[in-house]
Amino acid sequence: MYYSKVEICGVNTSELIVLNDEKKRELLIKAKNGDSIAREELIYGNLRLVLSIIQRFSNRNENVDDLFQVGCVGLIKAVDNFNTDLEVKFSTYAVPMIIGEIRRYLRDNNSIRISRSMRDTAYHALTVREELIRENENEPTAQEIANKMGEKKENVVRAMEAIIAPISLYEPVYTDNGDSIYVIDQLSDAGASDDIWLERIALHEAMKTLNERERSIIDMRFYKNKTQVEVAEMIGISQAQVSRIEKNALERMRKLF
């Protein structure tokens, strides 16, 4: 795929305009109220967004004109379905809509064939999902989608999984002024949150304030899961002494926290 060409689908890309957020919101409100001219201006003013998105699919060896047209379909859907009452940037809503439309097109043209009935179930589920998002303004569960479709949850999940094309963790999902956000950036690890990370640092610093015996007891009690009796036997003191040392050490550490 080459991007040195000036025209895509008869559109001179060098002449595409970029609307600021204020202008976008003004046009979105007018378009929502039935102003077709504002709607067309809004679509044309966001074609650069479509252009930037299709570039991340350059490794698919797809025709750039086809991808651009499909991306424009996603853009039009975003314009027509955007809720101006929410405090959300239009691009935040439009980007996944455009990407989703392109991915649906790529799945339809995938060499791996999926049965027509399963594909129909999956696309029906996607349509229902979008309807539920508009109605409830949150992501529906698979069960909610299945209930609205009158299908079994297992059938819906299986169909939607069948049309998902595997992607690289390093595939960009959004690009702004050359800075990309990749799939891996959107993944989270509950065991490595900022709060837990900071707590570990604080705990490490608090442990430094303890003397050698206190550190040893805390380590055996809370890191090696030893009982006070076991600790007492290992270091040659009474269980009462272990309890007292542990209590004093924990109290000092709590104050530091």
Image (cartoon, rainbow, N blue to C red):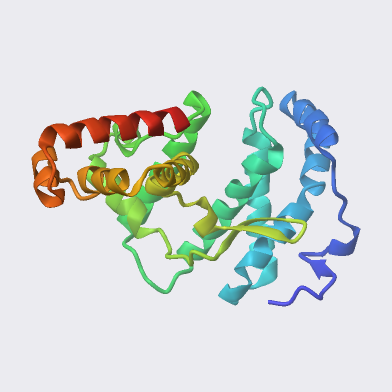
* Residue sitting nearer the eye, 10 or 174: 174
Report the residue at 81% width, 32% height from top.
27
- On screen, residue 238 versus residue 202, left or right, reads left
Report the residue at 78% width, 31% height from top.
25
* Residue sitting nearer the eye, 62 or 180: 180
The quadrant of the image that shows the C terminus is top left
- On screen, residue 59 versus residue 112, left or right, reads right
| Quarter occupied by residue 43 | top right
Image location of residue 179, percent across then percent down: 71, 59
* Residue at the front extreme, as displayed: 237
Badge count: 0
* Residue at the right extreme, as displayed: 15
The quadrant of the image that shows the N terminus is bottom right
Residue 157 vs 24, above or below: the answer is: below
Residue 193 vs 115, above or below: the answer is: above
Image location of residue 242, percent across then percent down: 18, 37
Image location of residue 114, percent across then percent down: 34, 64
Residue 124 visible, this angle: no
Report the residue at 66% width, 63% height from top.
54
* Residue sitting nearer the eye, 243 or 222: 243
- On screen, residue 248 versus residue 131, left or right, reads left
* Residue sitting nearer the eye, 77 or 232: 232
Residue 226 visible, this angle: yes
